[in-house]
Image (spheres, grey):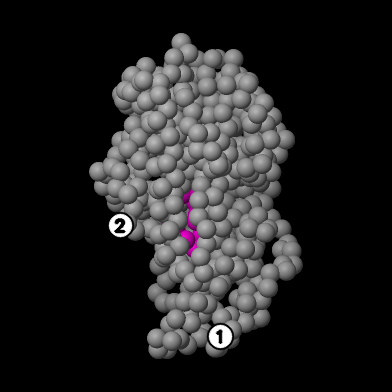
Amino acid sequence: MIRILHTSDWHLGQHFIGKSRLAEHQKFVQWLLDKVKEKQIDAVVIAGDVYDTGSPPSYARELYNQLVVAINKLGCQLIVLGGNHDSVSTLNESKGLLKYLSADVVANVQDNLSDQVITLNNRQGEPSAMLCAIPYIRPRDVLQSHANESASDKAQALGNAIAEHYQQVYEVADRKRKALGLALPIIATGHLTAMGVKSSDSVRDIYVGSLEAFPASAFPPADYIALGHIHRPQVVAKSEHIRYCGSPIALSFDELGSEKQVLMVEFDETALVSVEPIYVPQFQPMQAIKGDLNHIEETLIEIGHAAHELPVWLSIEVETQDYLNDLTQRIEKLTQDLPVEVLLLRRARKQRSSELIRQEKETLDELNPFEVFERRLESEQFEGDDEALRLQRIKECFAQIVHQVEEEHGLAPSKPASTTLKAEGLPDMTHSTVSEPMLEGEEADPVTATAGDVEALPLFHEEPPLAVPSAAPVTSAIPSKKPKADSDTPIVDDLFATGDDV
């Protein structure tokens, strides 16, 4: 019998619209240690994104080290997997030392696959499960690029390579348990997007211009698959043994609709027995308010009557038919005597009656580089089969340029047109079905900038649309936009050259 605690996406060191999450993370770590002791947990698995950035602040590293020491004192194993936010070198710098504290760190794909298979012991020191420790898989770790590949070909090749890596690591784990003469359960991990899951605003797309989602049928037949990267807890493809536990704290306001949790997973000598969610308290009060001014005022009054030890962080989305140029001042007046901090204020944007209205109100801050490029393409004409092929080459060249610039400058990946991996052609290792796709929510026009804004790339010689000037901040908690730095990104108008230049 063995019990593991499945958690992921801590994002230590995150700044949330100018606010530090240190106090929340400290309280969560203490809460987690209490649960490990109370539930007699044998191993804690963090399935990626322990840090928010590749260069986490010193206080985030200190909290991480304190966690390792504290869990070791409780006689519990710790397994840390690298995520897409984590730096391989940052996680590896203390890997050897942490090994002496019963903490295994797998930051990236290993040359020796045996290094990705970890034996989990119960508190009596007996082997009780085999763990296929699979971190975030970078394309370069499992795939070699080939000339003249289309985007769909690259997506299919990457999906096949990831599936093959899972199968190879699973086979190593199977051989190890046979060598022990025990029919131990096998657990696999992963940090990726599976088909059919619901994401949130704080989740970055991983495989830009290539694989968007991984089919559940391509996972190996492990007894339990502990996934990270998606911040909402959910079952994948209606398979109870394939799960995202979600992040332990809300990393964006749209995550407030789902209760945060970690998963306690129990196994007997040969198989999965149960999966039980343990709900995480909300350590920082947060609330999203959406409606007209009357509804917002009523909700604020209710918040004022409630007892809160800390100020409530608010996201306010105003629905109104009129353009109110004094909206910021109105909200400031409504909240000035309340225990709240307005971190995000925006107007709701309904479906536009025409494309012209959308373009008139659009600013570069609302678009990613691919959307800006699509607007530019709309001004060109591509008629006939030859021109259609040329358009495809232009888009592929642009995707490569953006990807290269983002990697060089450490920017979050931008999302191009979706290319979802087809399940056909991949090894079918389970009999799972794909769950229903995510429904898109309503968009909104930002009134004030958030700290997570990505600078728009200067893609064209033309002047961008003029942005509507925002009003003064509601409170000092609403961050002001930083001036954009000049970019050395190459101008890409040459992509529209004809002939063999593309």
Is residue 282 or residue 462 the one in the foreground? 462
Residue positioned 34% across, 53% down in the render: 426
Query: Overall secondary structure of the magenta stretch?
Result: loop
Please state which amino acid type lies under the numbered disc 1.
Answer: Asp
Q: Is residue 81 visible?
A: no
The residue shown at (58%, 25%) is: 103
What residue do we see at 66% from left, 76% from top?
A: 491
Residue type at tag 2: Glu
Residue 317 image offset from top left, x and y in percent:
49, 54
Q: Secondary structure at mark 1?
A: helix
Left or right relative to 322: residue 224:
left
Residue closest to the eye, 310 or 156: 156
| The one of 450 and 144 positioned closer to us in this rendering | 144
Give the residues drawn in magenta, as a range: 199-212
- Taking 141 as reference, is 245 left or right? left
Task: Give the residue at mark 2.
Answer: 424
From the image, tell me which residue sits under label 1: 500
User: Toward which corner of the image does residue 496 lie, by quadrant?
Assistant: bottom right
**What x and y, as percent, mark residue 409?**
68, 58
| Callout 2 crowding tier (Cα within 10 Å): few <14, some 14–19, many ≥20 | few
Q: Is residue 248 within the magenta segment?
A: no
Q: How many marks?
A: 2
Label whose residue precedes the other's in the sequence (2 or 1): 2
Cα separation, mark 2 vs mark 1, equals 34 Å
In the figure, 151 relative to 36: above or below? below
Task: Provide residue 461's location: percent of width, then percent of height.
Answer: 66, 80
